Image (cartoon, helix red, strand yellow):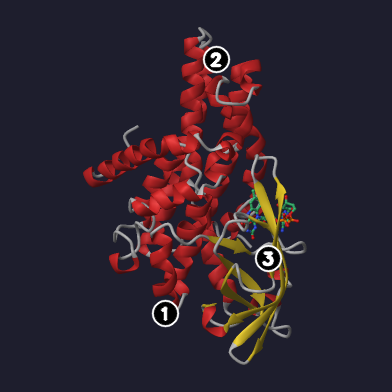
Amino acid sequence: MDLGLTHPQRRLREEAASFCASVRPLLEADPEWQRQGMLSDGDSLAVNAALGREGWIGLSWPPELGGRGLGRLDATLVEEVFGYHWLPLSSYLLSYKTIGAALERYATAELRDRLLPPIARGELVFCQGFSEPGAGSDLGALSTRAVRKGDVYVVDGQKIWTSSAQLADWIYLAVRTSATEPKHRGISVLVAPMDTPGIEVRTFPTLGGGVLCEVFLDGVEVPVANLVGEANGGWTVLMHTLDFERITAEKVGGVSWLLDGVERHLAEHGRLDRSSRERLAALRGEAAAARLVSFRAADALDRGVPASHLAAMAKLGGARLVQRAAAAAVELLGLDGLAEGPAAAVGGRAAGMLRASVGSTIAGGAAEIQQLVIARRGLGLR
Ligand SMILES: Cc1cc2nc3c(=O)[nH]c(=O)nc-3n(C[C@H](O)[C@H](O)[C@H](O)COP(=O)(O)OP(=O)(O)OC[C@H]3O[C@@H](n4cnc5c(N)ncnc54)[C@H](O)[C@@H]3O)c2cc1C
């Protein structure tokens, strides 16, 4: 599809595709990769290290922070290619696209200099501790407390659904620093190494084939210097962090790969009839729309104009696309679509993606919350 890209942007995407081909043997040898449904949700430290080594992490950061001085739009164009090649991207998406972007904007110069270069080298992986048992959609209700004692905050509480906490080096934590301020004004953001005494991680399996984590925080001492943004000013930081997270071009890439694979499989088996062609074409139309919204949101971030409603549209469109495309793939493939494993139709990915797709309208903020953001910040409704 002609996306109206510039010559350097097209070259960047071709280089990204070559990189993906070069790490393919690494992936095929990884049993975890074989089990994962939606691969961009999966994790591989080996792939993250290769991304860092080859200069693919931090495209939008300045060279002195380990980046290439390009824009968020360029990074998003590349993320779609990574998704098309089904790279396990959880570490990249958390550490660079989401938390790294927030650190670049809100962290002190000292924290930025300390954390961003190793993220860009693929040597430092973050997880994101926002959700709690009593605070998900209503994130402002979070109750993990951070009490200042001299030069440290002492943190007590629990996080849940934390992706990649089992292998992360650092955690990006939303905490309550004031019990007296109205709930959205008593929140701060801290970063801490995962080996800080008092942090315990427990994993549990997901429908998607991977794991999520609970993170328990018991008397965890975090230096005040590790505060990101202002004390009690964390709400704004959290909302911008979610904007970065919600641009999901990699999901569109994964869907495009699946649709191409289904079409090829049906053609090879003499089953590509008019109705299946029409169904695939309609889904490709939805994918094109979701892709363009992601690109628009990234472009808005580059231009410094409000992007929350565009990011929410990208998230909602991408998540629903994943669900519809996975369900259609399984239906179109028939019984072949239910088998999993490399020898099955489309590498057994249709059923895996259907399993993983359930979480896509929950992770990063549930679909109803995206609709609220679009209504309030995009349409000005109250
Ligand atoms: C695969 C996956 C990965 C995740 N990774 C992370 C992570 O790394 N870090 C992290 O912090 N969290 C993570 N999460 C958690 C995720 O952010 C929350 O699950 C999500 O915000 C929803 O919160 P909740 O589960 O508490 O559900 P609830 O907030 O209890 O929502 C339950 C239902 O009620 C609806 N609802 C709630 N409020 C409203 C409202 N005002 N209007 C209309 N409907 C409403 C919701 O839309 C939803 O359908 C992950 C979740 C998944 C599925």
Residue corresponding to mark 1: 110
Residue 218, can we see it?
yes
Earlier along the polypeptide chain: callout 2 or callout 1? 1
Per the model, the C-alpha gap separating discs 3 and 1 is 28 Å
Indicate the quadrant containing the C terminus: top left, top right, bottom left or bottom right.
bottom right
As rendered, which of 144 and 150 lies closer to the eye? Answer: 150
Indicate the quadrant containing the N terminus: top left, top right, bottom left or bottom right.
top left
Residue 281, can we see it?
no
Q: Is residue 340 left or right of residue 179?
A: left
- Does mark 3 have its CB less than 8 Å from ligand 1? yes
As rendered, which of 303 and 22 lies closer to the eye? Answer: 22
Which residue type carries mark 3? Answer: Leu
Q: Residue at x 63, y 64 (%)?
A: 129
Which residue type carries mark 1? Answer: Glu
Earlier along the polypeptide chain: callout 3 or callout 1? 1
Q: Where is residue 237 in the image (x, y as percent from the top left)?
A: 54, 71
Q: Residue at x 60, y 31 (%)?
A: 326
